[in-house]
Image (cartoon, helix red, strand yellow):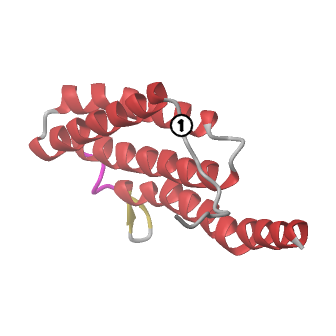
Amino acid sequence: MKESNELIYSIPSSYRRMENMHIVFWLVKDISWCMIWRELGLAMFIPTLTISIIIAWRTRHIKAELAHNLAITFWICANGYWMISEFFHFDEIIVWNEFTGKHLALIPFFTGALILLYYYAVQRPRDIKRNQAVTM
């Protein structure tokens, strides 16, 4: 068997169970949104967002994981805001020019995208360069 110098990332099983539960909450939230089950959708938004914040906090020491988990957290914020805007019927209200209430969800969507852009354009190349210098 060939040996690999590739780093191994492992997480405790309790963390994995929390991540799996997070997916369940997220799916129930989105199904509730689709079915217009307002109370359940709002109720599921809270644990979905909370767990994503906990996951980001737990992975804060691994830059790649933190960047992706923060992007997910901002995605859930945007997604939850959009859901709420539809549930309470301010999604079509004009806020500015042609932007409606639901378009405000673009702020957290873009925030998550900018975090990933920074990671891939700045942080990751810097880390690769640093690791290459260490192994030489």
Q: Is residue 88 visible?
A: no
Q: Position of residue 101 (x, y in %)?
A: 37, 54
Image side of residue 29 versus residue 46, left or right: left
Which residue position holds label 1?
Answer: 11
- The residue nearer to you, when weighing 114 against 13, is 13
Above-or-below relation of 88 to 132: above
- The residue nearer to you, when weighing 130 against 122, is 130
Q: Which residues are magenta?
A: 88-93
The residue furthest left is 35
Quadrant (top left, top right, bottom left, bottom right) of the C terminus = bottom right
Above-or-below relation of 95 to 9: below
- Give the overall secondary structure of the magenta segment: loop
The type of residue carrying mark 1 is Ile
Image side of residue 24 versus residue 103, left or right: left
Above-or-below relation of 106 to 85: below
Residue at the (55%, 57%) spot, across then down: 112
Q: Is residue 128 visible?
A: yes
Q: Residue 46 appears in which quarter of the rendering?
A: top left
Residue at the (39%, 71%) spot, across then down: 98
Residue at the (16%, 42%) spot, across then down: 31
Image side of residue 45 versus residue 16, left or right: left
Residue at the (27%, 57%) spot, across then down: 92
Q: Position of residue 97 (x, y in %)?
A: 44, 70
Q: Residue 80 appears in which quarter of the rendering?
A: top left
Image side of residue 9 versus residue 90, left or right: right
Instruction: Name the secondary structure under disc 1.
Output: loop
Magenta segment includes 80: no
